[in-house]
């Protein structure tokens, strides 16, 4: 069938479309110059924009890969420090006890992590230092002393539950290994509640009264001299004195005044939780020790 004339496809009021001019054969014509150089060519401009977009997408993919690599590196570093600690403690007490001891430290630190996240604060993975314990870090700049105290209490609370679980396992007949873990767990969490910085107890006192830090140092020195002489306690005292001095110097600043301003209700609740936890841990420590002596 012969095609209809072009005018049949146009609207009645629209004139016939003009014929398109034939392309010029002259390479110096404006049309050919624009085509050969890419000037004024929309497809070329779109191609350049597409190239930039592709480059940005590729850069974003590489940045994501780098971020994942850093995250994996931090995870591997945390796991590696845990393994090194297990080997270090295992060299003294055997690998099984080293695993249990590091597990108690991990559970304690996870208590801090959970409270950090509950408060909406980004927190690091737990890191382990042989014969020094473990730690996590988080930015408390947007919080106050009550937030710091709750985060500090969360570690001993969760860690005490783990120690109590070991105590129940021993009472259920699991063997003296679990009694030893329970005793160590009670001791570690009670030690952490001594009110000196940078221990958890010192951070709890930030919401109570910073003056209690000095009473805590008397307790820590007594423990270091009379109960358990160890370079660890001396190091804690030295580090704590530097941190305490830094905080005391800042107490008169407006920012510090706002940070340490805690509502009376929060102060009472935090204080009650602290005293109750110390009492329960002392009873657990005594019970594990007495049972060991009897058997």
Image: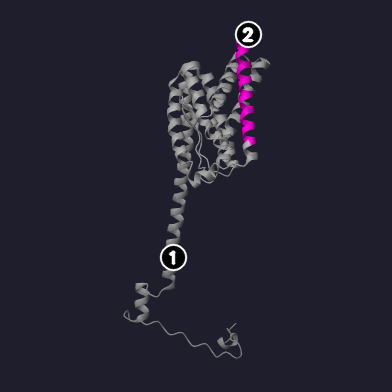
Left or right of 259, for residue 35: left
Contact between labelled residues 1 and 2, with CB atoms less than 8 Å apart: no
Between discs 2 and 1, the one toward the N terminus: 1
Left or right of 216, for residue 35: left
Q: Secondary structure at mark 2?
A: helix
> Please, is residue 143 above or below residue 186 in the view?
below
Name the disc covering residue 152, or none: none
Total labels drawn: 2
Main SS category, magenta section? helix
Q: Secondary structure at mark 1?
A: helix
> Please, is residue 291 above or below residue 256 in the view?
above
Q: Residues within 10 Å of mark 2 (few under 14, many from 20)?
A: few
Q: Residues within 10 Å of mark 1 (few under 14, many from 20)?
A: few
Residue of label 1? 49
Residue 31 or 289: which is nearer the viewer?
Answer: 289
Which stretch appears magenta?
268-295
The residue drawn where x is 57% and y is 16% is: 180
Residue of label 2? 294
Quarter holding residue 114:
top right
Q: Position of residue 98 (x, y in %)?
A: 51, 21
Quarter holding residue 38:
bottom left
The residue drawn where x is 45% and y is 63% is: 50
Q: Is residue 292 magenta?
A: yes
Quadrant in the picture for the N terminus: bottom right
Residue 135 or 92: which is nearer the viewer?
Answer: 135
> Please, is residue 66 above or below residue 155 in the view?
below
Residue 254 or 62: which is nearer the viewer?
Answer: 254
């Amino acid at each position: 069938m012969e095609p209809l004339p072009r005018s049949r496809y146009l609207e009645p009021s629209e004139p016939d479309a003009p014929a398109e001019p034939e392309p010029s054969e002259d390479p110096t014509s404006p049309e050919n110059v624009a085509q050969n150089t890419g000037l004024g060519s929309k497809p070329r401009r779109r191609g350049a924009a597409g190239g930039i977009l592709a480059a940005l997408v590729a850069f974003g993919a590489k940045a994501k890969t780098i971020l994942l690599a850093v995250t994996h590196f931090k995870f591997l570093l945390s796991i590696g420090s845990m393994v090194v600690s297990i080997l270090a403690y295992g060299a003294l007490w055997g690998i099984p006890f080293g695993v249990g001891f590091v597990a108690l430290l991990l559970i304690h630190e996870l208590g801090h992590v959970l409270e950090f996240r509950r408060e909406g604060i980004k927190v690091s993975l737990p890191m382990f230092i042989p014969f020094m314990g473990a730690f996590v870090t988080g930015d408390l700049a947007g919080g106050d002393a009550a937030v710091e105290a709750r985060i500090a209490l969360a570690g001993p609370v969760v860690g005490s539950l783990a120690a109590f679980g070991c105590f129940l396992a021993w009472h259920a007949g699991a063997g003296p290994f679990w009694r030893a873990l329970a005793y160590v767990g009670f001791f570690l969490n009670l030690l952490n509640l001594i009110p000196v910085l940078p221990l958890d107890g010192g951070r709890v006192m930030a919401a109570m009264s910073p003056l209690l830090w000095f009473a805590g140092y008397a307790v820590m020195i007594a423990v270091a001299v009379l109960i358990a002489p160890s370079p660890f306690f001396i190091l804690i005292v030295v580090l704590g004195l530097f941190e305490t001095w830094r905080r005391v110097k800042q107490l008169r600043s407006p920012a510090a005044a706002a940070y340490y301003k805690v509502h009376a209700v929060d102060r009472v609740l935090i204080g009650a939780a602290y005293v109750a936890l110390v009492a329960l841990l002392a009873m657990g420590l005594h019970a594990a020790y007495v049972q060991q002596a009897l058997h």
